[in-house]
Amino acid sequence: MGIQREYPLVPLVGTAAAVFNDLGEVLLVQRGKPPNVGQWGLPGGLIDTGERLVAGAAREVMEECGVAVEIRDLVGVFEPIIRDGDGQVRYHYVVVDYWGRYLSGELRPGDDAADARWVAVDRLEEFEMYSESRAVVRRAHEQWQANGERG
């Protein structure tokens, strides 16, 4: 049974991760499917029934980017609601954002990602993305640095 993403009956719960490599670069993906085709953001997606948020975040990063990660701490909650021309809710997600660190694997776009890249945090403005996503990356980077990671 498929999930009704467009015009959902209830908000859909997802998870995403701001993943950093040893240089402090963040992993971004370019969306290949609606909503927001072509827009950049954090790897993530809907959690499966019975799946914990942290496990879902790690799974989604692997599916979209081909890399294994360690999910660390909660960064925030992002609630994109997209309405159609008539004001009806076309998409409604509740996305729980974490930060994590890269463990292994070769970066490659997969699943519904059109592209995937490691990006310096000071270059975020060069990518078309939600301002909320930029804010999540910056908060996550602060937590990454406070945790004594490299970069």
Image (tube, grey):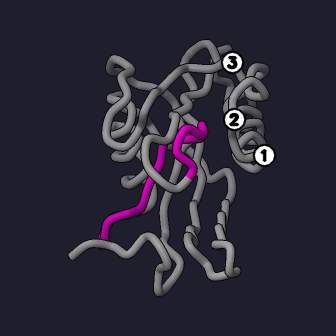
Mark linked to residue 147: none
The disc placed on residue 128 is: 2
Q: Residue at the location (44% across, 60% down)? A: 53
87 in relation to 18, above or below: below
- As helix, strand or loop, the secondary structure at mark 2 comes to loop
For this view, does 29 lie left or right of residue 59? right
37 sits left or right of 87 in the view? left
Q: Nearer the viewer, residue 41 or 57?
A: 41
Whichever of labels 2 and 3 marks the residue nearer the N terminus, that label is 3
- Mark 3 / mark 1, whichever is N-terminal: 3
What x and y, as percent, mark residue 62?
34, 37
Going 49% across and 41% down the picture, which residue do you hit?
Answer: 31
Going by the numbered disc 2, the residue's amino acid type is Glu
- Give me the disc on residue 120: 3
Q: How crowded is mark 3: few (under 14 residues within 10 Å), some or many (20 or more)?
A: few
Query: Which residue lies most toward the front here?
Result: 85
Q: Is the magenta stretch mostly helix, strand or loop?
A: loop
Q: Considering the numbered disc 1 on the image, is that residue within a helix, a strand or a loop?
A: helix
Left or right: residue 7 versus residue 108 is right
Query: Mark 3 against mark 1, which lies toward the viewer?
Result: 1
Write down the quadrant of residue 146 in the picture.
Answer: top right
**Closest to the observer, 60 or 148:** 60
- Residue type beneath disc 1: Ser
Q: Residue at x 43, y 70 (%)?
A: 5
Disc 2 vs disc 1: Cβ atoms closer than 8 Å? no
Q: Name the residue under label 1.
A: 131
Segment tinted magenta in the rendering? 36-50
Between the C-alphas of marks 2 and 3, the distance is 15 Å
CA separation in Å, label 3 and label 1: 16 Å
